[in-house]
Image (cartoon, helix red, strand yellow):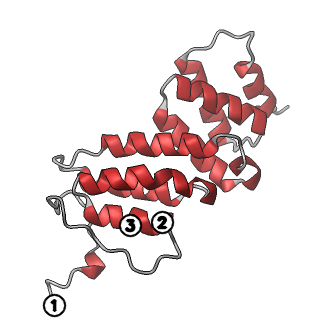
Amino acid sequence: MGLDKPHFARSLLSSGVRQNVELLHLIACIVIDYEVTDRKLIHGLLTKLCTARQREVVSRLLHLCRLYPSLARLSDLAVVWRDIAGWMHGEIDPESPSANQQLRRYAYFCLSFPAEARHTFDSLNAQMQSDGLLVGSQLLSIIISPAQKDIPIAMTVRERVEADVHLSWSDISNE
């Protein structure tokens, strides 16, 4: 006899059960691992996880929402996506040895957001430029405006080459 995962997750998320961060994390793990696609369940779970500031789990739930078209149309999903991208951008420390890895993770996350969310990323792009992450900013610009063919790199701020995105296939210094 198998357990009905969507029903089990819904019953755990119901208002009659005392909820804490650990329980929300467990419910999110069930939803992600078993790819539960109940819109009402995921919307409620996203709301509660955002309130609890569980951004890492929210980012994984957003990837699940991206996989299923019915989930990609949840209300306020673009705002949640932007908030998580803003958090990820804030976590990038240009002085850290792992800055490039953090920036790549951020860029991959931004690549996965739905088309409806593209207009919400203008402020993040401006912030990346002011932080000196010029190549990363240009990549985000391309993601935001896929029809734009040429995007100039603004050189008005000090460039942080060591923390920016490195594309080894475009390195012409070795030729």
- Amino acid type assigned to the residue bearing label 1 in the image: Glu
- Amino acid type assigned to the residue bearing label 3 in the image: Leu
Q: Nearer the viewer, mark 1 or mark 3?
A: 3
Q: Is residue 90 visible?
A: yes
Q: Is residue 117 positioned above or below 15 on the image?
A: below
Taking the image as shown, residue 79 lies to the left or right of residue 16, namely left
Q: Residue beneath label 3, please? A: 139
Mark 2 and mark 3 in contact? Answer it, CB < 8 Å: yes
Q: Residue beneath label 1, please? A: 175
* Mark 1 residue element: loop
Q: Residue beneath label 2, please? A: 143
Instruction: Give the number of callouts.
Output: 3
Label 3 crowding class (10 Å Cα cut-off): few <14, some 14-19, many 20+?
Answer: some
Q: Nearer the viewer, mark 1 or mark 2?
A: 2
Taking the image as shown, residue 106 lies to the left or right of residue 71, namely left
Q: Is residue 95 positioned above or below 24 on the image?
A: below
Q: Residue 9: x, y in percent?
A: 73, 27
Q: Residue 159: x, y in percent?
A: 16, 61
Q: Quadrant of the C terminus?
A: bottom left
Q: Is residue 173 positioned above or below 136 on the image?
A: below
User: Which residue is at the front of the view, 141 or 4?
Assistant: 141
